[in-house]
Amino acid sequence: MNPALSNNPSLCSTQNQLFNDADADVILRSSDNVDFRAHKCLLSFASSMFHGMFTLPLPNDPVPSEIKDGIPLISMTEDSRTTEKLLMFCHPSYAPTLDSLDDIKSVLVAATKYEMAGIRKRASRYLSHFITSEPLRIYCIACKFGLEEEAKLAAKQLLASPMFPRHYIKELDYVPATALHRLEEYHYNCQKAAKEVTCRGKSGEGEGIDPKNPFRFKATCSTCPSSNRALVISRNGSQWISWSSWWREYMKDVAVALQERPCGATVKNSDLLNRTFQRAAACSICQGSVFTKMTEFCEVFAQEVDKATDLVVLEFGEV
């Protein structure tokens, strides 16, 4: 068994055997001096760069610097962890586990360098595992490697949280200001779309109720403290009604919240709803129905917000 492999704790026994094949016809040596015995045919299928190297080396191409055990040895600039995962992708019977964004980045860098389009595509799929927890990092990585679909998914996920966290994100160094400007512009346009939906929902602000409006939610009560009277005009005529104060306060609060997090989940935020329920509890009439009414309404409200922001397009350009 290859001593370098057996002494490396990051490599399991299965992988030791996989990269210690006596029939291998090339050795790849990582930057930290771990040797991987591999097969030229597998590398050639996965990489157009290796294919060219093995078929007809050109003067400027990397060439084997030495021979070991009678077969060529090629020095790699990647460390053993990255080389291992890259070769696992090349093997027909195995696939690596990319369980961190750092692993995904290192494989994407190597796959791009060695012109491994298929491995780039497969490695990029692992980004979705971190879409909820690390959307800004994924957006930056996607921009860096020209992954438009992943960038758009990350931008969409960022609507559910403050766009730029207070802690340092090292991947921000990967992208130019133009990529961040596109993200900010997308977020701003989603804010506008969400605000338009909120305005449609404020049926009690005096602009009238459209019978086809999905927000025809009558939070009316004549006994609520500080209820506001409004003239409502519909196809059936006009009438004066009193809008519950807790309803108006909820709509004000949610309008502010959507400026920071313009997505459907915001309107169903538990803190917002709990404040609304507490306000409604002051009214003997509203307290018995507010939970059911608001739960049903917020489902529709959230769907409408998400429909509106889905129509907003993120402008994408490779870094």
Image: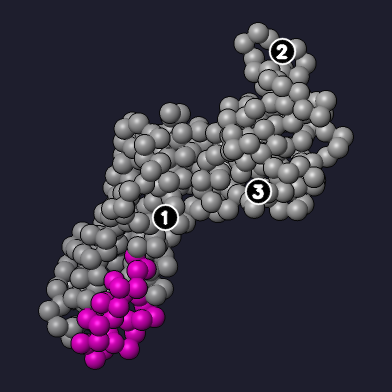
Proximity of marks 3 and 1: CB atoms separated by less than 8 Å: no
Q: Earlier in the sequence, mark 3 or mark 1?
A: 3
> Which SS class for mark 3?
loop
Q: Position of residue 77 (x, y in %)?
A: 58, 30
**Badge 2 density bin: few <14, some 14–19, many ≥20, Cα 10 Å:** few
Q: Position of residue 66 (x, y in %)?
A: 72, 22
Q: Amino acid at mark 3?
A: Asn
Q: Tell me: 125 left or right of 58.
A: left
The part of the chain drawn in magenta is: 267-294
Asked whether residue 189 is in view, the answer is no
Residue 107 occupies which quadrant of the picture?
Answer: top right
Q: Amino acid at mark 2?
A: Pro
Q: Is residue 206 above or below residue 120?
A: below
Q: Main secondary structure of the magenta part?
A: helix
Question: Disc 3 marks which residue?
Answer: 8
In the picture, the quarter occupied by the C terminus is top left
In the picture, the quarter occupied by the N terminus is top right
| 277 magenta-colored | yes
Q: Nearer the viewer, residue 312 or 144?
A: 144
Q: Position of residue 143 (x, y in %)?
A: 45, 35
Residue at 38% across / 57% down in the picture? 160
CA distance separating discs 3 and 1: 49 Å
Residue at 31% across / 39% down in the picture? 185
Q: Amino acid at mark 1?
A: Asp
Q: How many marks?
A: 3
Q: Tell me: 86 left or right of 288.
A: right
Question: Disc 1 marks which residue?
Answer: 306
> Which SS class for mark 1?
helix
Q: Tell me: 26 left or right of 165.
A: right
| 76 magenta-colored | no
- The dot on residue 57 is 2
Q: Is residue 98 above or below residue 206?
A: above
